[in-house]
Image: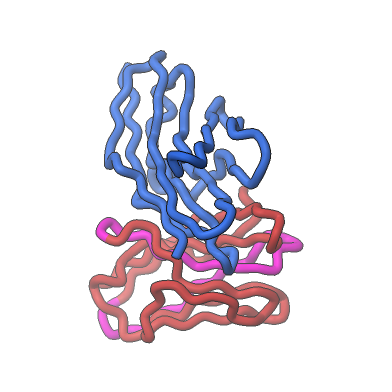
Amino acid sequence: AQSVAQPEDQVNVAEGNPLTVKCTYSVSGNPYLFWYVQYPNRGLQFLLKYITGDNLVKGSYGFEAEFNKSQTSFHLKKPSALVSDSALYFCAVRDREAALIFGKGTTLSVSS
Amino acid sequence: DSGVTQTPKHLITATGQRVTLRCSPRSGDLSVYWYQQSLDQGLQFLIQYYNGEERAKGNILERFSAQQFPDLHSELNLSSLELGDSALYFCASSVVDNYGYTFGSGTRLTVV
């Protein structure tokens, strides 16, 4: 079965510093990977996805993610964090039937 | 507005009762997915429908059922409600095989 793991429940970073939110995956076949963000009392907003092609994927709000096949990872990154980036971040993988399977989520806290 | 409409936004009901949550997918999307988000279980995939037919099942309880109607809207029925069913229920829609998933803003269910 396809699965993703987010090893950190929380990531703390100072505003202006780079941030990384980690995700590892376990799939059979080619992985289709996604990152979503959830702000308090809101739905899930799409950030970026990796389907095929360039290992560095650029997404919304200045976020990017690096697909690493050898390490089975898909870490979310941003060069300079903003306080407004504070939210809950989910990594997800598309399973065989096209549903998204989510990790447990990582809370990002950016301090000013 | 994501284009996926969920109603109601909030629902408070008593244990043992039955409720129906409604989802209207984005125009042109044939697939609908239901998810449950709770503090202890995270984001759990429940069930997927494609053009009126059930396509995949996740961690959906037998007390829960869903259907997708000819106009493509979907309903999630939750019966014999328990306190532990209190959660945020999300609907998402997609055009299968274009790897784009759009989420609604969710229905917050509180069972008292």
Please state the horizontal and vertical placement of residue B66, each as a whole percent of the image: 51, 80
The quarter of the displayed image where residue B4 is located: bottom right
Question: Which chain is tinted red?
Answer: B
Please state the horizontal and vertical placement of residue B98, each as a whole percent of the image: 71, 55
Please state the horizontal and vertical placement of residue B44, each as a whole percent of the image: 40, 63
Q: Is residue B64 left or right of residue B7?
A: left
Image position of A12 with respect to B92: above or below:
above
Specify the colour of chain A: blue
Image position of B96 with respect to A56: above or below:
below
Residue A104 falls within the magenta-colored stretch: no
Q: Which residues are magenta?
A: B14-40
Q: Quadrant of the N terminus of chain A?
A: bottom left
Residue B27 falls within the magenta-colored stretch: yes
Please state the horizontal and vertical placement of residue A44, each as a whole percent of the image: 49, 49
The one nearer the camera, A45 or B107, is A45
> What residue is drawn where x is 32% and y is 30%?
A109
Q: Quadrant of the C terminus of chain A?
A: top left
Residue A95 visible (yes or no): yes
> What residue is drawn where x is 39% and y is 68%?
B11
How many discs appear? 0
The quarter of the displayed image where residue A10 is located: top left
Residue A59 visible (yes or no): no
Residue sitting farthest toward the top: A16
> What residue is drawn where x is 60% and y is 75%?
B49
The one nearer the camera, B66 or A52, is A52
> What residue is drawn where x is 49% and y is 44%?
A36
The quarter of the displayed image where residue A85 is located: top left
Image position of B47 with respect to A66: above or below:
below
